[in-house]
């Protein structure tokens, strides 16, 4: 498979096949992210995916650090999903917030984090959770990955917001571990 | 220091590379901590890189199973990209197009940022109410210079601007768009709807409603019926929502404020 960096260079020149290849590589990740928002239905999940790639591809020429493409794309996707999710709650958001879809700058990422490419980290954190519904939710979504958060809510017979909260609590554990690793590197 | 948890001050110390703070939290975060995890779950905006990295770990490298391949999604992305290029090119000509007061124009408009949602009035009347799904309208406003901004229910717009409507529905069908202002309701056109969330459009592209010459409250209704509707019938349903027919109506109102162009 052609490396992402090469695909990005071609895509920046408007190469349609490069766009298609990037979409193929990264759609599953954007899909998983969007499906973690239990309030979003299947149509809205597809909206998130489409909007994410359209916005990313349109703004691609401005992306200076191609190495940051993955997290940049996922940040766009999360912003998009959060916006739709907030709309579903009819939460009031400012006009500015609605337009703040594409991060214009990608901050320097600690080198230690760039090395984080192992599902083992996720597995270890899952094992850290006590047996019970929370662990089952996380296992179904982040380890097995076949069900959306909405589908997990239906299967477990609990509210969609409960599933979202469980997944967010687990994401907080992941963030704790990542932050710890950054700090460990800084101490060396 | 022993009981110190993550908060804004701690984060500031870490960003300033305070050695004591780094040493403390390197140890402290090695074990589960509900307080620190609650802070991280709240996601301070400046930690978005940590959010993105967590997503990268979880969604790109984390899940084991593969999801079903997507056969058609890229085509939708490509279509949207091409459509937006066309919209940008045509946006500058909007002011000239939106000249006649109350004239319904079919123009191609940008929708950058997306419209804001509104459920000012979503009604279901008649015997099919139990089976009916959502029909919702939202909107964005295109200024004369082509700039787009979302507008919420009851939001303000200017006479030189153009309103773009977006609908969400769970089923295909047709619907009439009806505008109701000081002069009463008037049907603006019939549109084919498809399931999902889409800009209101016809064969000419995304539909935009010129606000030139308008003033005060304007209400827009998308009227869908299981029976064959006429424009006059749609207007009547807006005038008389309790007409008893199986009908779904989504509404959205704005206020046109003159003299601010």
Image (cartoon, coloured by chain):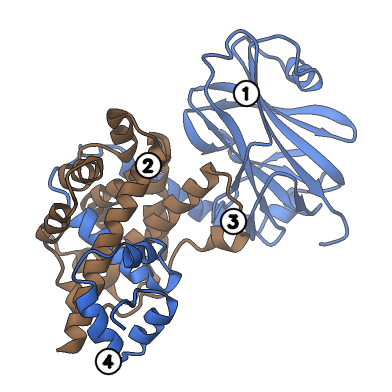
First in residue order: circle 3 vs circle 2: 3
The label nearer to you, 3 versus 2, is 2
Q: Share a chain, discs 2 and 1? A: no
Report x, y in % for residue B161. Answer: 74, 53
Chain ID of residue with mark 3: A
Asked whether residue A16 is in view, the answer is no
Quadrant assignment, res A141: top left
In space, the residues marked 4 and 2 are separated at their CA atoms by: 38 Å
Task: Report the residue marked by disc 2.
Answer: A162
Q: Secondary structure at mark 2?
A: helix
Position of B151 relative to B46 (above/below)? above
Chain A colour as displayed: brown
Chain ID of residue with mark 2: A
Q: Residue at x 87, y 46 (%)?
A: B215
In space, the residues marked 2 and 1 are separated at their CA atoms by: 37 Å
Position of A43 relative to A96 (above/below)? above
Q: Residue at x 70, y 57 (%)?
A: B143
Position of A177 relative to A76 (above/below)? below
Answer whether labels 3 and 2 touch (C-beta < 8 Å).
no
Task: Report the residue marked by disc 3.
Answer: A93
In space, the residues marked 4 and 3 are separated at their CA atoms by: 38 Å
Comparing B218 with A162, the one in front is: A162
Task: Report the residue marked by disc 4.
Answer: B19
User: Can you tell which chain is drawn blue?
Assistant: B
Task: Report the residue marked by disc 1.
Answer: B175
Q: Share a chain, discs 1 and 4? A: yes
């Amino acid at each position: 498979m052609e490396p992402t960096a090469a695909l990005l260079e071609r895509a920046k020149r408007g190469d349609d096949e490069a766009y298609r290849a990037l979409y193929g590589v990264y759609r599953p990740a954007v899909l998983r992210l969007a499906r973690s928002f239990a309030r979003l239905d299947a149509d809205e999940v597809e909206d998130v995916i489409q909007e994410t790639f359209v916005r990313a591809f349109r703004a691609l020429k401005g992306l200076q650090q191609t190495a940051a493409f993955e997290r940049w794309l996922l940040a766009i996707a999360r912003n998009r999903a959060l916006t739709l999710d907030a709309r579903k709650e009819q939460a009031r958001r400012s006009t500015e917030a609605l337009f703040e879809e594409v991060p214009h700058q990608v901050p320097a990422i600690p080198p230690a984090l760039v090395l984080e490419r192992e599902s083992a980290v996720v597995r270890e954190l899952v094992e850290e959770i006590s047996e019970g519904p929370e662990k089952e939710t996380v296992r179904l979504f982040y380890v097995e990955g076949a069900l959306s958060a909405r589908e997990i809510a239906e299967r477990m017979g609990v509210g969609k917001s409960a599933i979202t909260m469980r997944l967010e609590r687990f994401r907080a554990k992941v963030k704790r571990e990542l932050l710890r690793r950054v700090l460990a590197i800084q101490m060396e | 220091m022993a009981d110190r948890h993550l908060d804004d001050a701690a984060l500031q110390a870490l960003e300033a590379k305070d050695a004591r703070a780094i040493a403390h939290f390197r140890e402290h975060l090695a074990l589960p901590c509900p307080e620190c995890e609650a802070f991280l779950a709240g996601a301070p905006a400046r930690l978005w890189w940590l959010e993105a990295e967590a997503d990268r770990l979880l969604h790109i490298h984390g899940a084991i199973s593969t999801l079903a391949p997507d056969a058609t999604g890229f085509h939708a992305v490509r279509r949207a990209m091409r459509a937006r290029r066309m919209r940008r090119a045509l946006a500058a000509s909007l002011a000239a197009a939106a000249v006649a007061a109350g004239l319904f124009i079919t123009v191609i408009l940008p929708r950058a940022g997306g419209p804001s949602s509104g459920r000012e009035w979503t009604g279901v009347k008649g015997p099919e109410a139990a089976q009916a799904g959502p029909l919702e309208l939202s909107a964005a406003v295109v200024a004369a210079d082509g700039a787009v901004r979302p507008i919420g229910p009851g939001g303000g717009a200017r006479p030189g601007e153009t309103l773009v409507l977006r609908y969400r529905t769970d089923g295909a069908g047709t619907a009439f768009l009806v505008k109701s202002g000081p002069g009463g309701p008037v049907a603006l056109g019939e549109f084919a709807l498809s399931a999902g969330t889409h800009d209101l459009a016809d064969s000419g592209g995304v539909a935009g409603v010129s606000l030139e010459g308008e003033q005060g409250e304007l209400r827009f209704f998308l009227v869908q019926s299981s029976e064959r509707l006429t424009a006059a019938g749609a207007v009547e349903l807006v005038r008389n929502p309790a007409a008893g027919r199986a009908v779904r109506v989504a509404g959205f109102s704005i206020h046109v404020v003159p003299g601010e162009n």
